[in-house]
């Protein structure tokens, strides 16, 4: 949508500027027609060049989008593999870790009880 607005603004500005120049130029009809013809060709070439640039930008954007999607998919697949590997590595030690955590929790509870007990 922005490309269309840009193209429309460019064409409109060129036409208005051309009309202003033609109307304010003290020249004969033949000279004016020659200038209009030259201006028309110049505008046509400018529009063609602008269209080509817009198509290049569009194609580059599409290609970048495809590469980004593929990169994200590959990254997600790698992360899933790493998580799966981590789960497999930790599974044999899971029970030991749980016991260790319970021991730490009970030690903390004992410390809290001891710290909360009145001094003798």
Image (spheres, rainbow, N blue to C red):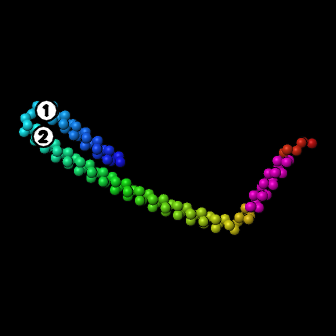
Q: Is residue 12 above or below residue 64?
A: above
Query: Where on the picture, by quarter, is residue 105?
Result: bottom right
- What's the magenta region? 98-114
Q: Is residue 42 magenta?
A: no
Name the residue beneath numbered marker 1: 25
Give the image location of residue 63, x and y in percent: 38, 58
Q: Is residue 42 above or below residue 90?
A: above
Give the image location of residue 109, x and y in percent: 81, 51
Name the residue beneath numbered marker 2: 35
Left or right: 88 with respect to 107?
left
Query: Where on the picture, by quarter, is residue 31?
Result: top left
Q: Main secondary structure of the magenta part?
A: helix
The residue that appears at 79% across and 51% down in the rendered structure is 108
Query: Where on the picture, by quarter, is residue 34?
Result: top left
Give the image location of residue 94, x and y in percent: 71, 64
Q: Are marks 2 and 1 in contact (CB under 8 Å)?
A: yes
Give the image location of residue 14, x and y in percent: 23, 40
């Amino acid at each position: 949508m922005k490309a269309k607005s840009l193209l429309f603004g460019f064409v409109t500005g060129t036409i208005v500027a051309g009309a202003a120049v033609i109307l304010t130029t003290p020249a004969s009809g033949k000279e004016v027609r020659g200038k209009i013809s030259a201006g028309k060709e110049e505008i046509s070439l400018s529009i063609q060049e602008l269209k080509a640039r817009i198509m290049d930008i569009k194609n580059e954007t599409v290609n970048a989008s495809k590469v980004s999607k593929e990169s994200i998919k590959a990254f997600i697949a790698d992360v899933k593999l790493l998580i799966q590997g981590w789960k497999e590595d930790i599974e044999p030690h899971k029970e030991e870790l749980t016991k260790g955590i319970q021991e730490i929790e009970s030690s903390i509870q004992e410390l809290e009880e001891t710290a909360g007990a009145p001094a003798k």
